Image (tube, helix red, strand yellow):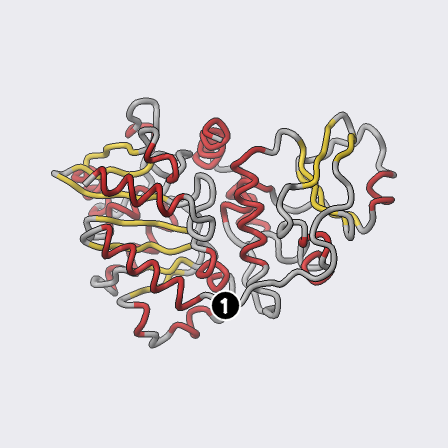
Amino acid sequence: MKSVINEFCTRIGRNRLLVQGAGGNVSWKQAGILWVKASGACIADADKSEIFVPVELGKLSDQIRLGNFDIDLRLHESGGMRPSIEVMLHAMMRFTVVVHLHAVPVLAKLVQARFKEDISGARALGKFCFVSYAMPGAALAKGIHDALVSSPDANVVFMGNHGILVGGESVHEVEKAIDSICAFFEVSTFSAGGASSSSVGSFYKSGKRFIAFPDSEVQQLALDDSLFCRLEKDWALYPDHVVFLGACPLIFDSEKSFMELEADVDLPDLVFIRNTGVFVSDDFGSARSAQLICYFDVLSRLRNVDNLVRLTEFQVEELLGWEAEKYRQKRSNLAG
């Protein structure tokens, strides 16, 4: 089973529309053990390093029966790695193989206000249930548990402003379901017009060296006015984006206004300058790069959609202050 899982992980982990950096997780159950991806590990690395942590399924099941979804992940560390923050979701799904993804075609629908109504009666999605956004961890686990009690045969759980949970008795079954779901939700994407890359290569500001982000599509977030105008209001759409890229973007209406900043201003590692480009510091790293690309992939599918559900200020503060997410980000940065 493990070799098949590793091959599957490597395959989907290299598809940016399915997996972004250390986001998402995969598990399988075997002989009373739940093998689940470690927090901060990358699914794509399954072929070159150990990314799974064994957890006694019985212990998790006991806690679920008691209605306790807030477990101490440190108690289940193995080989210096903690199980995924979402380990309880994997334990409560009755299927052998469970996959949790932030699949872009689905995520771009999950942030829309009418998602639940739009999928009502959609037979092509299989047996599914829906839970509104909840803080990852105990709150989300409780919401999914309650949804599965009402829909015990559901093999797909849609999580508002978050992602999907897909279960099956084999990797093939799960992968087929994921392909069908993504195909159902996919829409035509943004087509760039005009400049495709920043006219500025690099510069120094406040003691940092900034370079133009090396992706012509991501550059459209600053170069295309329709996308640039959405940065502020449509920033905090889903957890991983906030955790890795912060509560709000630093945006400037012109290169001139940016360069006029005081020399000692403490700048973040990501800057958007209208009609100039998207710039990152040398310390930006692969984990945050993956999330920035994901944000473009999501926003490009929302070009003509305005009725979105955004994370509230309180929800953002919850995410940024959570120890488990700080640990995951640290591990992810080390891996990247």
**Against 216, is 286 above or below?**
above
Dot 1 corresponds to which residue? 187
- Residue at the location (34% across, 27% down)? 81
- Residue at the location (40% across, 68% down)? 184
Q: Of residues 44 and 74, which is closer to you in this image? A: 44
Residue 177 placement (x, y as % from top left): 29, 60
User: Which quadrant of the figure contains the N terminus?
Assistant: top left
Residue 281 placement (x, y as % from top left): 67, 33
- Residue at the location (28% across, 39% down)? 6
> In which image quadrant can residue 310 be found?
bottom right
Element type where label 1 sits in the image: loop
**Against 272, is 323 above or below?**
above
Residue 267 placement (x, y as % from top left): 73, 34
223 vs 286, left or right, is: right
Residue 245, visible in the rendered structure: yes
Residue 7 placement (x, y as % from top left): 29, 42
**Against 156, is 315 above or below?**
above
- Residue at the location (70% across, 36% down)? 211
- The kind of residue on which mark 1 rests is Val
51 vs 1, left or right, is: right
**Against 307, is 300 above or below?**
above
Which residue is situated farthest in the left direction here? 31
